[in-house]
Image: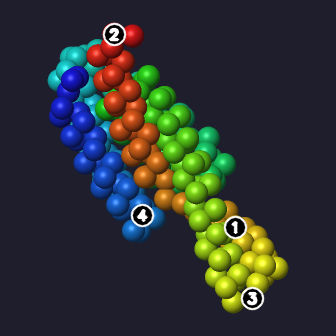
Amino acid sequence: MRNFATLLLLSVVLAIAAQSDLRHHRIPNKLSLLGLIAGLGLQTLAGGPHGLVAGLCGAGVGLACFAPFYLLRGMGAGDVKLLAAVGAFLGPRGALIAALLSLLAGGLGAIIYVVWRAGRASISAFVREGVAAAAVSAWIAARRARRSRLPFALPIAVGGIAAYWQAEITAFVGW
């Protein structure tokens, strides 16, 4: 295992971020900054100056991956900064993989959320008023759910931890 401290600190930062985002729809700047500093510190301890450069490049890749979504108003700045902190822990390749896996987890989560909201509304309307009302209720609920801003720290947490383990498994297998 590459570094248990990396897994532990990354998990703590992501768990706090996800909890804050789910409860308050905000990721504290202090948390992202502490995550960035911790990631850079661990990279420096593990690899010296090369580790620091890898951490900085990882933070830059994380920032660059999600910045377009922020500029297009599809994502909050906290999400972008959180992925930069994840990149500091994982390096540039890990940041890219974390971004891709986070987008995959977020997309899957959004689909599940919309289907869940539509299904819930549909069942309730079906019980009260029948099939026609169920279809209309499902459509309305799905449209409302699509407009909701979903907290994205949880998909970033899933993507970040999955990217960490992908790197561990790849290193273990020797690919």
Residue identified by numbered label 3:
129
What percent of the width, then of the height, locates residue 121? 65, 77
SS label for mark 3: helix
Q: Which mark is residue 174?
A: 2
Residue density around tag 1, few if under 14, some if 14–19, many if 20 or more, within 10 Å:
many
Assess whether mark 3 and mark 2 are in contact (beta carbons under 8 angstroms): no
Residue identified by numbered label 1:
142
SS label for mark 4: helix
- The N terminus is located in which quarter? top left
Q: CA distance from mark 1 to mark 3?
A: 19 Å
Task: Tell me the mark number nearer the camera, choosing from 4 and 2.
Answer: 2
Residue identified by numbered label 4:
22
Instruction: Name the amino acid, label 2.
Output: Gly
Task: Tell me the mark number nearer the camera, choosing from 3 and 4.
Answer: 3
Q: CA distance from mark 4 to mark 2?
A: 38 Å
What percent of the width, then of the height, locates residue 57? 41, 24
Q: Is residue 140 visible?
A: no
Instruction: Name the amino acid, label 3.
Output: Glu
- Could you tell whether 152 is left or right of 142 in the image? left
What percent of the width, then of the height, locates residue 6? 23, 33
- Could you tell whether 93 is left or right of 33 in the image? right
Q: Mark 2 vs mark 3: which is more N-terminal?
A: 3
Q: CA distance from mark 1 to mark 4?
A: 20 Å
- Could you tell whether 29 is left or right of 118 in the image? left
Task: Tell me the mark number nearer the camera, choosing from 2 and 3.
Answer: 3
Task: Tell me the mark number nearer the camera, choosing from 1 and 3.
Answer: 3
Residue drawn at (33%, 10%) of the image: 174
